[in-house]
Amino acid sequence: LEVVVSFECEGRSETPRSSVVNGKQQVRWKAQTTCRYFLQLLEGTFQSSSIPVLQTNNGPSLTGLTTIAAHLVKQANKEYLLGSTAEEKAIVQQWLEYRVTRVDGHSSKDDIHALLKDLNSYLEDKVYLTGYNFTLADILLYYGLHRFIVDLTVQEKEKYLNVSRWFCHIQHYPGIRQHLSSVVFIKNRLYTNSH
């Protein structure tokens, strides 16, 4: 089994190689990386059995979405995206794990609605996942949830009002949405019995 996926990176076509190792699909590409084409991986377009692998130029290959994302953040000298305090770093790590364990691979409507209900409660008094600072956790969760949020009805978006507010804010953050479709949110509530 070999799958080839092409990414566009600074005008050059990057073609990662995909292979199966120990029954798991691995996708490899070279580390001439900007966040632009890596963000395409974040959408969750690979199957849950796929394991992303980053083959670096000067060192060992890195495996796993969150490991690769954290590495790229450090390479870009944007370590503030990993959290600024010990507590914030732990919260970022918690949400990165949440993305991989709870969001990826869940596609049943019941799973998604349970996830959105929990996230909606959590975001009730927060602008971002860590509170008031934008982090890698917001980026990864935004990309992981996009495919589900885009299909929500107006009533469902209102039911998960805090998630909708957070999602709308993240999608308008400079440089984040990239090629993903913009999700429309209505500013005035139409349904009063949505909670």
Image (cartoon, rainbow, N blue to C red):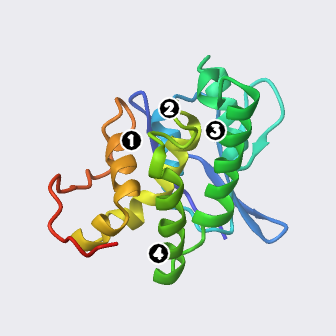
Q: What residue type is labelled 1?
A: Ile
Distance CA(mark 3)–CA(mark 1) = 17 Å
Q: How crowded is mark 3: few (under 14 residues within 10 Å), some or many (20 or more)?
A: many
Q: Which residue is drawn at 54% across and 55% down?
A: 122
| Residue 175 figure quarter | top left
Distance CA(mark 3)–CA(mark 4) = 27 Å
Distance CA(mark 4)–CA(mark 2) = 25 Å
Please tell me which residue lies in front, 146 or 158.
158
Quadrant in which the C terminus appears: bottom left
Q: Residue at x 54, y 65 (%)?
A: 118
Q: Do the residues labelled 3 and 1 touch (CB within 8 Å)?
A: no
Distance CA(mark 1)–CA(mark 4) = 20 Å
Decide if residue 178 is in sight here.
no
Q: Earlier in the sequence, mark 3 or mark 4?
A: 3
The residue identified by callout 4 is 113
Vertical placement of residue 58 versus 90, above or below: above
Q: In this view, does 186 lie to the left or right of 146?
A: left
The residue identified by callout 2 is 132
Distance CA(mark 2)–CA(mark 3) = 21 Å
The label shown at residue 69 is: 3
The residue identified by callout 1 is 170
Q: Are marks 1 and 4 in contact (CB under 8 Å)?
A: no
Decide if residue 91 is in sight here.
yes
Vertical placement of residue 106 versus 135, above or below: below
